Image: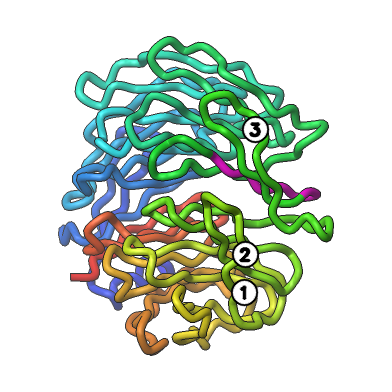
Amino acid sequence: MKQRIKGFFKLGLLVVLSVGSTKQMYAQTTPHHVEVKGISEATFAPSGNIVALGGQDNLVYLLDPNTGAVMHKLTGHEGMVTYLAFSKDGKWLFTGSADRAVKQWNMETKALVRTYGPFPSNIINIVINFNTTKILAVSDDGTLRGYNVQTGAKLYELPGDKNLVKLADFSADGLYFTTCSEVHNGKQYNATTGAFLHEYGKNGLHAFKSVRFSPNGALIATASDVEDASIYNAKTFAHIRRLGSQAGYFHSLKWSNDASVLISGAFGGPPRVWDVATGAMICEFKGHTEAVNCVNLNVDASLAISSGYDNTAKVWNAKTGVLVKDLGVIDGTPAVISNFSPKGEFAYVVTSDGTFRLYKLF
């Protein structure tokens, strides 16, 4: 413990919160760095004023990112919290758990609104359409279900024994959704009826790691477990271009907010930033000594964050690939989640030992 605290004092920023009890230990009063134990998931509200943490103790913690204070605890899950998703307007929080249920919370009153499920297995993905009328939830066995948020009625289901869905995504207008699977190709569906529309990569059966709509809904980016990432027209399904070669198979592909660039992560090669218009690589981030498992862009795509099995998380200039800040994750605990706050003033990391850390960037 002494060695851990010493390492953070070098940053000059540390607040330690013990969320397993009401006890709070402040190693330093500076509010710009928060550390919380027993955490499985983390995400910011769209306003940036709340960070939600999924607890291994079945609770959801709502923190003030500026002070590290726990403002509220949401109780009701009977298993570890495994996924968190805010609606785009920040009015609702949807939480998934190892108890095989999805819960919907009113963020003004902090009241439980509805429980969806039970699912066949623990929840690994929740996505919400633009006006919060529908959600998609995926369980670990590969089952996807769509629900009407106003009534709680199940709209459709893709059973896990046939589809093995791992991630889903809504189009910007909410009319369509996509899925990616560990054993099948990327697919697109009608979000009103659940009817199948199109299959991406149908010439070969490969695990698709990402099938994502661009923020404006015009394009779809796909990445598979072979050295392939492509861009398609989301309406006509026409293949537009393939991104340049990436060593090792892709595990993620994410859009910038203006849909001008994509950031990719791959096992076997460094994270890279791509120009959507040309498919050319803009830059890559060289510095991790082992595989990177998570990459993200900040709000204006000027910075990127990456984390991996070398037990580090790093912030980069997303235009040049130059390292801006090494966040110095503790030895022996690989980072499994890393991202920016909505306005980009914070970066956060969750490590495999269940520790959440929040860093003040500016």
Q: CA distance from mark 1 to mark 2?
A: 8 Å
Q: Is residue 36 above or below residue 271?
A: above
Can residue 295 be spotted in the picture?
Answer: yes
Examine the image and state in which quarter residue 46 appears.
top left
The residue under label 1 is 242
Q: Secondary structure at mark 2?
A: strand
Say which quadrant the C terminus sits in.
bottom left
Residue 320 lies, in percent from the top left, at 37, 89
Range of magenta residues: 177-184
Can residue 333 be spotted in the picture?
Answer: no
**Crowd rating for badge 3 (residues with CA inside 10 Å; few <14, some 14–19, many 20+):** many
Residue type pointed to by label 3: Ser
Q: CA distance from mark 1 to mark 3?
A: 31 Å
Q: Secondary structure at mark 1?
A: strand
Q: In the visual, does 221 lie left or right of 71?
A: right
The residue under label 3 is 139
Q: Secondary structure at mark 3?
A: strand
Q: In the visual, does 230 lie left or right of 34?
A: right
The residue under label 2 is 239
Q: Relative to the observer, which residue lies in front, 141 or 328? A: 141
Residue type pointed to by label 1: Arg
| Magenta segment main secondary structure | strand
**Crowd rating for badge 2 (residues with CA inside 10 Å; few <14, some 14–19, many 20+):** some
